[in-house]
Image (cartoon, helix red, strand yellow):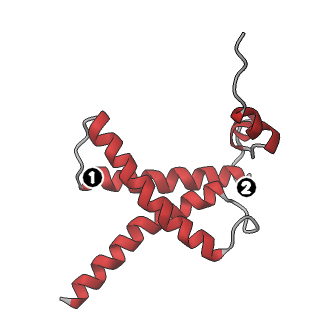
Amino acid sequence: MIFEVLIGVLEILVLFFVPGFFATLAFFPSKKEIDFIERFFFSIAFGITILPFMLFVEANFLQIPINFFSNSFNFIFVAVFSAFIYCARIQFIKMPELFYKIFSKIEKEDAVFFLKKPHRK
């Protein structure tokens, strides 16, 4: 009984931690940006938010039933896609220049530009 509970808790931690960890690598590829504790908690937070959100969108908008296959696919998709983005950002994989323009850091001036209200004539 206790062994089954421990296995269940371990499965839930892996389910939420692994895709979230790869997502944090995609968002924060450098070890200088966030430390180990922040990466650990961001991993859990991203895992808890990304996977259920994807299941919600698939179930309500794409009419894909929530089952073992859809959950496993989302788990693998998030992990592989995030790992791909991470490898591209550290330039382990050579990508077209457009990719680096899209995923480069937004400068402070650019972020302020998006926050300004448009002028009406």
Which image quarter: residue 87? bottom right
Q: Is residue 39 above or below residue 75?
A: below
N-term mark: 2 or 1: 1
Q: Which quarter of the rendered picture does the C terminus lie within?
A: top right
| Mark drawn on residue 28 | none
For label 2, the crowd category at 10 Å Cα-Cα, with few meaning under 14, some 14 to 19 and many 20 or more, is few
Residue 112: image x %, image y %?
A: 76, 38
- C-alpha distance separating marks 2 and 1: 31 Å
Q: Is residue 121 above or below residue 15?
A: above
**At 72% across and 68% down in the image, what residue appears?**
31
Q: Which quarter of the rendered picture does the N terminus lie within?
A: bottom left
Q: Is residue 61 above or below residue 21?
A: above
For label 1, the crowd category at 10 Å Cα-Cα, with few meaning under 14, some 14 to 19 and many 20 or more, is few
| Contact between labelled residues 1 and 2, with CB atoms less than 8 Å apart | no
Residue 108 appears left or right of 25: right
Query: Circle 1 sits on which residue?
Result: 69
| Mark drawn on residue 90 | 2
Q: How many marks?
A: 2
Residue 106: image x %, image y %?
A: 75, 43
